[in-house]
Amino acid sequence: MEVTQAEIERELRSRFALYNPYPKQKVFHNSLAMSRVISGGNQTGKTFCGTHDVAFHATGYYPDWYTGWRLKARYDEISGNMICTIVVAATDSKTLRDNIMKKIVGTEINDYADGLIARKFMVEGSFVKSRGVSGGLLDSVQVRRQDGSICFLCFRSYEQGRENLQSLTADYVYCDEEPPQDVYAELMARLAATGGHFLMAFTPLKGMTSIVQEFWNGEDPSKELFCMSIYEVDHIAKHPEKIAQIKSMYAGLSDAEREARMMGIPAMGSGVVYPIDDAVLKCDAFPIPNDWKRICGLDFGRGEHPIAAVWLAFDPEGVCYLYDCFKLTRVGDLEVANQLLARGDYIPVSWPHDFVRSSGISSINGLEKTEGWKYKEIYEKYGINFTDTNAKTEEGSVRVEAGIVEVRQAMIEGKFRVFSHLSEWFKEKATYLYKEDGTVTKEKDDLLDATRYAYIMRRYAVSKTEHDIYSNGYINIDRAQDNTLDKDY
C-alpha cells in the first residue's frame, strides 16, 4: 500500500521528537561549518548525536529547532533522478552493524524496522547486503526523502580500506570514531566533487593526530570542533554517584587517557593549550563581593623577562573569576610590591616552585638558595603575604601539565570566567601552544603561568570578610607548613 506524505511526516516527526539534545549538541547540529567534529568523553551521547544527524539528512525531515545546514539532492544524469549519497563509516564491521547501523535503520532480525528511519520509508528491493559479513550488515539501502528524492545510505568500515570507498560520490559523510589517515583522505576526496559535508563523533584516544589538529587549532573557519565532557550531559552530571563511579573506573589510567575518556580532550601534541572559545570565558567586570575567596598568582621576572600577576576570586558555587592582572618589565621591587598590595594586602600570593630549588647560586645563612628565593624574601619585607608553600596541586605535583589539566577542566565545565577587558591575558591564551614534543611553549606565557600558580593553590584563597574577622591576617583551613623540595618537575 502506498505510503502518503502525511504518514511519512507524522512517523518521522514522532521519532525525531524523542530526541532532545543537550545545549552543546544543539549548537553542534545547528553549525553551518562544512566539517564538524564532536570530541566527547565516554557515555556522553556523541554517537547518539551523530546518528540523529544522519537520520535528519537521509530523510530530509528536520526538527523544529534545527537551523543548520540541510542536505539538498542533486540531479543524477545516469538515472535522471534527484539523489544524494550518505556514507556512514566506523572502525569495523561488527561495530558498524551492532551500534551505528542499528541506531539508524535497525537490525535484520526485526526486518530493519527498529531504527530512527522507519522501515516503510526505505525503498522496497533496495537492501544490499555487505559481502562476507554475517548478521545482516548492509552495504546500502535507499531512503525516500521528504522532497521525493532518493538518498543512497551506504555503510563502510575502516577495516575495508580506502579501496572500498573509491567508487562513491558522497554528499555527506559520518565517521564514528577517528579513521586512519588514508581512509580520511579518501573520504574527503569523495566529498570534493559535491562540496559535501563531513561529520565525526569520537573519543580522542589516539591523541593529537594530524586529523584532530585540523579541527583543534581553529584556523579554518570551515572546520568546527566541539568538546563534550561528562559534566555537560545531564544523564551523568546530575548524578554524583555516576561521576564518582566513572572517576573510580578511570583512576588507574594515565592523565592523558583520563582526559580523553572523561572530557573529550586528546592527549596533546601540538596545538592550543586552552582550546575554549574566548566568548565562552569572557564576562563583564563587576565588583567582587567581600565574602568571595581570593588568591593571587605571581610569576617572577627580571631584566627583560616580565613579572606577571593575576587575581582570582571564587563565588560560593566554586566558579572562578579572573578579575585582574598585570605584566611589567624592568620595574623595581618596591613598585611591584605596591602593585600587589594595592589590590589587597590580605590576599595570599602563590609563587613558583623554582624559588625553593637548591641550586648553589647564592648562600644565605649557610644555606644554598636560588636567586629567586632572595627576591621572595625582599617582597616579604614589603609585606607581601606569600602562601606557606610553593604552588602545587593538592596531590603535591608541580608539573606544568598537571596544573594545565585543572585549569582546562574548569574552563570546560564552565567554572572559569575571565573579565572581558583583560586583553593581555587573552592575547597570551591565543598563543599558548603545545609543541610537537608535547611540551608547552615558553614564550609570552607569563600571565598564563601566574594563572596556573593561583588556580592550583585555590585551597589557600581567603575572603576580605575572613581577614577582617581575624586580626592576625588571613586564615587557611589547610595551612600546612611545607618547606620540602618538589622532585617531579
Image (tube, rainbow, N blue to C red):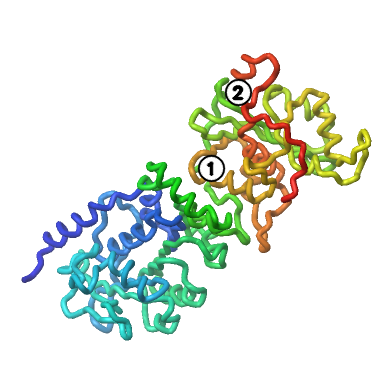
The quarter of the displayed image where residue 257 is located: bottom right
Of label 1 and label 2, which has the lower sequence position? 1
Camera-side residue of 381 and 77: 381
Classify mark 1: residues with Cα within 10 Å, few (<14), some (14-19) or many (20+): some
Q: Residue at x 54, y 39 (%)?
A: 416
Residue 70 placed where, x, y %?
A: 32, 61
* Badge count: 2
The percent coordinates of residue 203 (x first, y second) are: 46, 60
> Vertically, is 239 above or below 479?
below
Q: Is residue 451 left or right of residue 249?
A: right
User: Alpha carbon of mark 1 to alpha carbon of mark 2: how far?
Assistant: 21 Å
Vertical position of residue 425 compared to residue 146: above or below? above
Residue that carries the numbered disc 1 in the rendered image = 410
Residue holding disc 2: 463
In the picture as drawn, the residue positioned furthest to the left comes out as 1
The type of residue carrying mark 2 is: Ser
